[in-house]
Amino acid sequence: MTSQTTFRRTRTSHPKISLQTCAASACTVIAGLAMMLDATPMRTFIQRHPALLYFAVTFAVSWAGVFAVVGPSGFPLATDRAKGLLPLIVIGIVIGPPAASILLTGLGFGRRGFREMLSHLLTWRVSARWYAVAFFTTPILAAAALVALLPLSSRFVPGIIATHDKSAVLFAAVAAGLVAGVLEEIGWTGFAIPRLLPRHGVIKTGLMVGFLWGAWHYIVAVVGSGTPSGEFSVELFLPQIFFYVAVLPAYRVCMVWVYERTRSLLVAMLMHASLTGFVLFILMPLNTTGLPLLAWYAVFALALWSVVAAIGVRTVRRAPAPRG
């Protein structure tokens, strides 16, 4: 009875303090942002270095978010604990790109910047072939990689075929794809790529953003490489880090190429969602780690880099001849 009374008292008094604290903090933040919005030197600095600042803020927010969830002892996490904290880890990392994009757009470019971003987001009237490229690039190449490896082992059967709970896999694929595609691309394609593409072109922009996009995931690879006892596992770590180093940069070049042809943030979100949904859920072979998973990623990466080479050739042919 005493504990219940104490609990009730705590519940009635604590929210008032929390609300007052939150209100004071919110006012402080808003006042600070207002001051920065009026600070011409800061706005000029953001306009001169938008991509650099975006990458810095994205890494800082996302990695701080993951660290806040797992704590200093969570590198790596034990398997069961990692599964339990997975939703919070995902939230912690994916919040970085949209937060950086919205913050820097507001401070550096104001309403004009938001109008441009919204315009690209609402650009949906593009040729149906670009929707097909965005959606089918991953399933075609990743499934072809599995088919090529299937004669070596039956473990390369796509997960959606081997599993008994297909509806759960499809639901997880759609949900994770939408979360990753929408939130991440508000930053990568909504802010960084439009500011790099005019100066560096498709291939260089894709490689720069792609390798940084992969590096942004490294903290997740470390956190997710724990054994049931919490020890670091090279077998779990290597496939993940290879995916971030070899697959994501090539795929990002493809994404930048599609964006350069469509100027559609919506299509970029779809393409990102396709990668997340098909590779991590629909096609992922069941209970496959270590060298088999690495082999699938390697063949998939080879296919993607072949596409990148074709894009490079096409881009060179389209480039205007130098004036002499």
Image (tube, grey):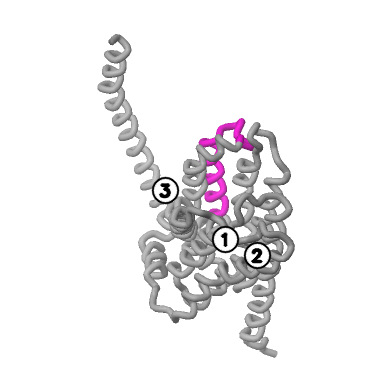
In the image, which residues are magenta? 53-78
Residue at the spot of label 2: 146
Q: Is the N terminus in the top left, top right, bottom left or bottom right quadrant? A: top left
- The C terminus lies in quadrant: bottom right
Tell me which residue sits at (67%, 86%) in the image. 322
Give how far across and how far down residue 4 sits, in percent.
29, 15
Q: Is residue 141 magenta?
A: no
Q: Nearer the viewer, residue 218 or 108?
A: 218
Given this view, does label 3 or label 2 mark the residue nearer the observer? 2
In the rendered image, is residue 206 in sight? no
Camera-nearest residue between 186 and 113: 186
For marks 3 and 2, give the CA distance: 52 Å
Disc 1 target residue: 283
Q: Which residue is mark 3?
A: 36
| Sequence-wise first label, 3 or 2 | 3
* Residue 187 vs residue 240, the one in the foreground: 240
